[in-house]
Image (cartoon, grey):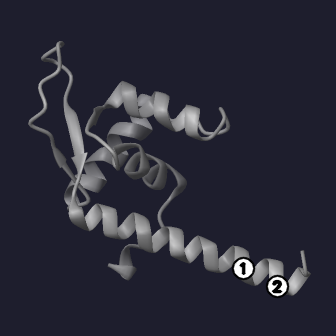
């Protein structure tokens, strides 16, 4: 699992957006922009490339959740995906702790 780290910012935000519940692509794009305060905007091409990679790595799966618009595919995070998110958060917290310790902030 640690060999999947570090996550790109896009991968991280996509996985976090799926952590609580399945979502479709447009919903994920909106969640990422909202979570980042507008700093990160994921375009459709980037999103679908990321989704394909996350699927291949077993971090997400297609969801059984049915959308009103049947053309929309929904995705859900896997147990492995949740573990990777938690490991990435621990990695980033370590970076922050070490940086603060050294700079004494």
| Residue at horizontal 50 percent and vertical 59 percent from the top | 8
Q: Quadrant of residue 1?
A: bottom left
Q: Are marks 2 and 1 in contact (CB under 8 Å)?
A: yes
Q: Quadrant of residue 17?
A: top left
Residue highlighted by disc 2: 101
For this rendering, which residue is in front, 46 or 7?
7
For this rendering, which residue is in front, 105 or 28?
105
Q: Which mark is residue 9?
A: none
For this rendering, which residue is in front, 51 or 16?
16
Is 97 left, or right, of 86 in this rendering? right
Cα distance, mark 2 to mark 1? 6 Å
* Residue farthest top in this picture: 69
x%, y% of residue 26? 37, 25
x%, y% of residue 7? 47, 64
The quarter of the picture where the C terminus appears is: bottom right
Question: Element at badge 1?
Answer: helix
From this view, report whether residue 67 is shown above or below residue 62: above
x%, y% of residue 53? 29, 54
x%, y% of residue 65? 13, 32
From this view, report whether residue 73 is shown above or below residue 3: above
Number of on-image labels:
2
From this view, report whether residue 49 is shown above or below residue 98: above
Question: Element at badge 2?
Answer: helix
For this rendering, which residue is in front, 100 or 69?
100
Is 68 left, or right, of 42 in this rendering? left
| Residue at horizontal 71 percent and vertical 73 percent from the top | 96
Q: Quadrant of residue 92?
A: bottom right
* Residue farthest right in this picture: 104
Residue highlighted by disc 1: 97
| Residue at horizontal 29 percent and vertical 62 percent from the top | 81
């Amino acid at each position: 699992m640690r060999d999947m780290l570090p996550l790109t910012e896009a991968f991280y935000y996509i996985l976090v957006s799926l952590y609580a519940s399945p979502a479709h692509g447009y919903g994920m794009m909106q969640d990422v922009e909202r979570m980042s305060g507008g700093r990160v905007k994921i375009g459709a091409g980037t999103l679908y490339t990321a989704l394909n990679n996350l699927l291949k790595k077993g971090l997400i799966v297609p969801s059984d959740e049915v959308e009103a618009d049947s053309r929309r595919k929904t995705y859900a995070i896997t147990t492995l995906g949740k573990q990777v998110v938690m490991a990435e958060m621990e990695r980033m917290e370590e970076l922050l702790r070490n940086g603060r310790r050294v700079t004494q902030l």
